[in-house]
Image (cartoon, helix red, strand yellow):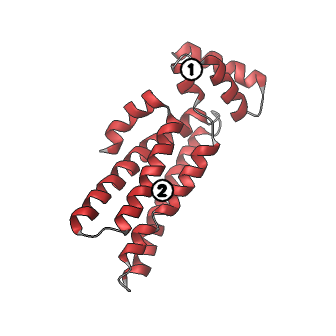
Amino acid sequence: MGAIFAGRLADRFGRRRVLIIASVTFAIGSVLSATAPNVEFLIGARIILGLAIGVAGMVAPLYISETADPERRGALVATYQLAITLGIVSAYGVGYILAEGGHWRWMFATGTVPAVILLLGALRVPESPRWLALKGNMDQARINLMRLRSNDAAVVDQEMADMLSVS
């Protein structure tokens, strides 16, 4: 369900801001799941987790595709998908290790690790220049693009022209 609304949220509030909110929601959902006093609470916490993961799962590759330079864009999105797959395998491994002792609360608590990593990453990156250009904030789009392209003015000028021609 989170993925259904993620596009509209990202278009309205920005890719970076939505990733930050999703990561915080992911962490909260993990903590609530780990501390659930009953099954109904656990189900509610898992719904919160699912919404956050759905949003992040849609907005993260969108952000990558909008901020990566064209030569590396496909490789970075593929690397993102590989990281998701490795994360799923890791989660199964952690679950397997902790399930034997009945440590299901710790299984849910470990979900805060990727949530914090996502939050720290989202706090370090600039907003998508393409989203800023879509919102008419060309000056900030240029500043962010310069930050992403190592201040290569010729590359930034060409990419800004491409953004203007598409919108």
Q: Which residue is mark 2?
A: 84
Residue 153 percent coordinates (x, y): 77, 23
Secondary-structure class at tag 1: helix
Q: What residue is shown at x 49% (from left), y 56% (from top)?
A: 115
Q: Is residue 41 left or right of residue 106?
A: left
Position of residue 161 relative to residue 124, above or below, is above
**Does residue 148 lie above or below 99 as drawn?**
above
Q: Nearer the viewer, residue 25 or 96?
A: 25
* Label annotation for residue 133: 1
- Structural distance between the alpha carbons of marks 1 and 2: 29 Å
Q: Percent from the top left, x then y, of residue 144?
A: 66, 29
Q: Determine the image quadrant of residue 35.
A: bottom left
Residue count near mark 2 (Cα–Cα under 10 Å), binned few <14, some 14–19, many ≥20: few
Residue 73's disc is none
Residue drawn 38% across and 31% down?
Answer: 8
Callout count: 2
Residue drawn at (72%, 28%), measured in percent from left and top? 146
How many residues crowd mark 1 within 10 Å: few (<14), some (14–19), many (20+)?
A: some
**Can residue 83 be seen in this snapshot?**
no
